[in-house]
């Protein structure tokens, strides 16, 4: 299970958080600056890591029951 939070502008992805990587990754110049800023904020980074448990793990049983 992987939690992904992507940020887009004009159909171009500029930043992504992936729970498997555990940090933000930037794909454009603007996205790299955002990723560096967010990765240096420990409280925001830990909140994003916790989203896997909050969102994914609570809803996985619902998805498997419907399949």
Image (cartoon, rainbow, N blue to C red):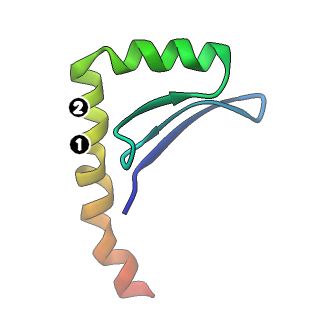
Could you say where residue 20 lies in the image, as x and y percent from the top left?
A: 37, 49
* Side of 43 relative to 15 (left or right): left
Q: Label 1, secondary structure: give it.
A: helix
Q: Label 2, secondary structure: give it.
A: helix
7 lies above or below 28: below
**Residue of label 1:** 50
Could you say where residue 59 lies in the image, as x and y percent from the top left?
A: 31, 66
Q: Residue at point 23% right, 20% down?
A: 42
At label 1, counting other C-alpha atoms closer than 10 Å, the crowd grade (few under 14, some 14-19, many 20 or more) is some
Q: Residue at point 39% right, 18% down?
A: 38
Callouts 1 and 2 close, C-beta under 8 Å: yes
Q: Quadrant of residue 57?
A: bottom left
**Residue of label 2:** 46
Could you say where residue 16 lies in the image, as x and y percent from the top left?
A: 52, 35
Q: Residue at point 30% right, 51% down?
A: 52
Q: Residue at point 32% right, 14% down?
A: 40
* Side of 29 relative to 39 (left or right): right
Disc 1/disc 2 C-alpha distance (Å): 6 Å
């Amino acid at each position: 299970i992987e939690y992904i939070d992507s940020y887009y502008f004009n159909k171009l992805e500029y930043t992504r958080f992936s729970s498997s990587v555990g940090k933000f990754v930037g794909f454009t110049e603007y996205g790299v600056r955002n990723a560096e800023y967010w990765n240096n904020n420990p409280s925001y980074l830990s909140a994003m890591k916790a989203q896997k448990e909050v969102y994914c793990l609570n809803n996985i049983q619902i998805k498997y029951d419907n399949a």
